[in-house]
Amino acid sequence: MSRTWSSRNRTTRVIAGTATALAVLTACGGGGAETADAGKGTADKPVSITFWGWAKGTKDVVDAFNASHKNIRVVFEEIPSGTAGGYAKISNAVKAGNAPDLVSIEYASLPEFVSSGALQDIGDQFTEQDRGKLLPQAVELTTLGGRSWAVPFDAAPQAFYYRKDLFAKYGVTVPKTWDEFKAAAEKVKKADAKARIATFFPDDPTTFEAMAWQAGAQWFKAENDTWKIDTTDPATTKVANYWQGLLDADLVHKDASFSPEWTGSLKNGTTLGYLGASWGAGVLKGTLPEQSGKWAVAPMPHWGTPASGMLGGTSFAVTKDSRKKAAAVEFAEWMSTTEQGVKARIASGTSSAFPAATALRPVAKSVFDAGYYGGQDIYALFEEAGASIAGTWAWGPTTGTTNTTIKDHFGKLAPGGPSIADAVKAGHDATVTELTKRGLKVEG
């Protein structure tokens, strides 16, 4: 097994507990379409499947698959990322009975789609042998109630991207700890009154959650048939207070993620860093091609011991009414577990995916053009970051409610006004209310 995710045993215990609590929920999940599966098709009679997703390089992957397969044709529609409206689009399509066959769903949101009955169990197509090719923790994140609900694609350890030319110009040392990050932020602001070291994203609670995860938080804990919710633990409180301090001191920008304002500040050099994930390397490369050679990647700042959370991570799931499960899973597995699939995505130049298929990481590294980062071995850094991911975090079945509430309250952050801690508390209360409304046992 790869040294990445060396905390496997701890993670397994957490996911096993989550699976126990979800066992009741998955009873309402789709066990398979009522009508006969159309199979995988033949060259003479190919099966056409529809696929919705948003990850960088996806169209290139679809094109490569269609060019090399005669039995299945994939019709792709790009939708907004999950937090930007993609999940609402998928949910509405499922309710209307016109959902695509295959959809992209991040690990954090998978339990909610499963519990709402939006997906099919794919265990009859995605076999133990297939799952054996993938990172065990990613497989566990897609196995709920003892049933397999999605094909894992990638892992997403955190990373810190920074403008090495501007760091050198301002005499800023790359921070290893969060204390050093604050000191570096102060130095950046002093050197250029308009410049900031990084950005707080008020529209993206998942970035904050990944930092809470990194600090050792555990918001959701499943014990028997009870969900224990705790967003006021010491780790979360520490992270909330830390970022509140940065905002209050005006040491970071506050812009929506991937917005024109954020992109513009990167282009003009008034934002020097980006706290993202492994997939962020491709985002920067595709967004700022003119800055090739000016960026570098470092481990996330930590609280005393190197650690990382996971920010995102994608899986592919079959919707409940699809009659083409076999073909959809074949395509999903091709994207996730074959050299051709990984090459097609990363060769696009916009993706820096860190595959869940550990054997394919050397393939990803070989295809990714690291010239943008001065030839730096960013995949070695992702391996180290992945190895330090804490195994205590688990996702609950109401991520949409949790994140929408936090996002709404993050949008109200203001000096002397609502705080990050207030937003997280609101998310906690909304989560407890929603779980209770669903008839689940809750403590917290």
Image: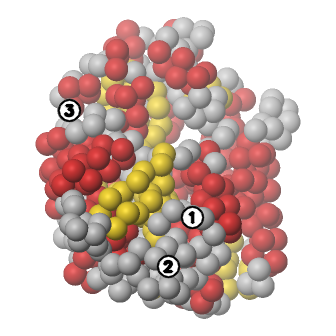
Q: Which amino acid does label 3 sit on?
A: Asp
Numbered label tally: 3
> Is label 3 in a helix, a strand or a loop?
loop
Q: Residue furthest right?
A: 417
User: Between tags 3 and 2, which lies in front?
Assistant: 2
Nearer-N-terminus badge (3/2)? 2
Nearer-N-terminus badge (1/3)? 1
Q: What residue type is labelled 1?
A: Ala
Q: Whole-Å distance between the Cαs marked 3 and 2? A: 37 Å
Quadrant position of residue 261: top right
> Is label 1 in a helix, a strand or a loop?
loop
Residue visible at 53% across and 47% down in the picture: 79
Quadrant position of residue 133: bottom left
> Is label 2 in a helix, a strand or a loop?
loop
Describe residue 198's horizontal placement relative to residue 139 as left or right. right
Percent coordinates x, y for residue 349 in the rendering: 28, 34
Provide the residue designation for mark 2. 120
Provide the residue designation for mark 3. 369
Describe residue 132's horizontal placement relative to residue 96 as left or right. left
